Amino acid sequence: MFTTTVLPSDSQVSPVAKGMEMRDPSRVGANGMDTLTAGMTNNVVPWVDDMLAVRDARDEAAFIRVFGHFGPRVKAFLMRTGMDAALAEECAQEVLVTVWNKAHLYDATRASPSTWIFTIARNKKIDVLRKQRRPEPEDLPWGPEAEPEQAEVIGLQQESEQLGRALRDLPEKQRELIEKAYFGELSHSEIADQTGLPLGTIKSRIRLALERLRHSMK
Amino acid sequence: MTVKHHLTDDLLMAYSAGDLPEAVNLIVATHISLCDECRAALGSYDAVGGAVLDTCDTVEMSKASLNSVLDMIHAQDSVVQDKPASNTVHDDVLPAPLVDYVGGGLENVRWRSAGMGVKQAILPTSKDATARLLYIPAGTAIPDHGHHGLELTLVLKGAFQDEGGYFGRGDIEVASEDLNHTPVADISEDCICLAVTDAPLKFKGLVPRIAQPFLGI
């Protein structure tokens, strides 16, 4: 639906580009994934195709969709980690520019778009709020595979989607709890104080959702 | 290589959330460089972060936002995006994150004597926790080195033994001050470790978190 969108080359693009917040589930099954995901197309994380289009075809229309979805989320995330609105806006823009510039590093067999963009936003937070760089683990010695297995991509994305659903389905209080841990708003022990949930319970709830993902990533 | 002593879930989650001092991030990143199990677990915690990002509230971007982002990517697009690998040094003992902080391989470490044949080199990180490389001659016991609060010790070469077990390359010991331990380097070869201690006055949140698995509270 939007794959053929052509953008004006100047800066006249409406800030709220048409359909920016929309996505067309029918596109999800592209690239030969249809047969493998027959009947569950709608469940596959929709931003994978857009990220791959940004990475492989430098597709600006796809990037604008990614921007429309993730920009407001990254901004909200950065504000909750302690930035004021103006700084969060500036940093969110930089995060999205990084998404474009580092798209060649995006590996759909290793992370969903949400996960990958989360790590960029988190690193921006550390960079700006703590004025530190973040040591990253050494890359795996075998490097990225030339031809990633479609089934692997789909498997990981489905697990990610399940994790997202699991998170959304949690009772409000528990979901807030996990969010706060990631926003750095409360320490684990403070969370336990506030909610009455012992740390072990929090951890086992998170762990349950993680098990499947962990399995698929080994 | 089989790593037997791993990072705690608390440390992995806090590393994923970006909630740790630089020195602790460094030892976590170094352990993960040597441990596929913790690497996979970190992937899971990052995925939770992604799910949180995806399900959390949104805050509208400013009206000019998209245009300025597009301007930025147009301005940069002609620039070559692949920087040459900055980290070309490969070291058999020091994984890549440490090579970065040492500024080279093991031969570039600027050791200072700490007595009893033990040498140390403090790495440049933010002040809220301290990362040091320790060189312990084979068979030597590390005397009380006066740490308070958290101490993380990762073996890079050789091995040591203490009340917590036997630690070889890649193994990490997560100790609170309540764990009374006297590490002794294995007799077969000299031991090189990365040790991270926190500065208790500045650094509150993590200590109870780290202590928790040991105290069972």
Image: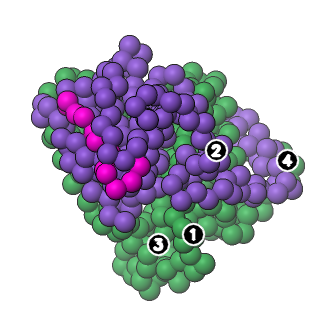
Q: Amino acid at mark 4?
A: Ala
Which of marks 3 and 1 precedes in the sequence? Answer: 1
Q: Residue at x 53, y 77 (%)?
A: A148
Which of marks 2 and 4 precedes in the sequence? Answer: 4
* x, y percent for residue A9: 86, 54
In whole angstroms, how far apart are the C-alphas of marks 2 and 3? 41 Å
In whole angstroms, how far apart are the C-alphas of marks 1 and 4? 30 Å
Q: Amino acid at mark 2?
A: Asn
Q: Is residue B33 placed above or below B208 in the rendered structure?
A: below
Q: Quadrant of residue A58?
A: bottom right
Q: Quadrant of residue B140?
A: top left
Read off the residue under disc 1.
Answer: A143
* x, y percent for residue A84: 57, 21
Read off the residue under disc 3.
Answer: A153
Q: Residue at x 76, y 55 (%)?
A: B83
Q: Is residue A28 placed above or below A211 in the rendered structure?
A: below
Q: Magenta includes A205?
A: no
Q: Residue at x 48, y 64 (%)?
A: A110
Q: Which mark is residue B75?
A: 4
Front label number (1 vs 2): 2
**What's the magenta region?**
B179-190
In whole angstroms, how far apart are the C-alphas of marks 4 and 3? 32 Å
In the rendered structure, the colour chosen for chain A is green
Mark 4, secondary structure of its residue: helix
Q: Amino acid at mark 1?
A: Gly
Q: Residues within 10 Å of mark 2 (few under 14, many from 20)?
A: few
Quadrant (top left/top right/bottom left/bottom right) for the N terminus of chain A: bottom right
Residue A9 in view, yes or no: yes
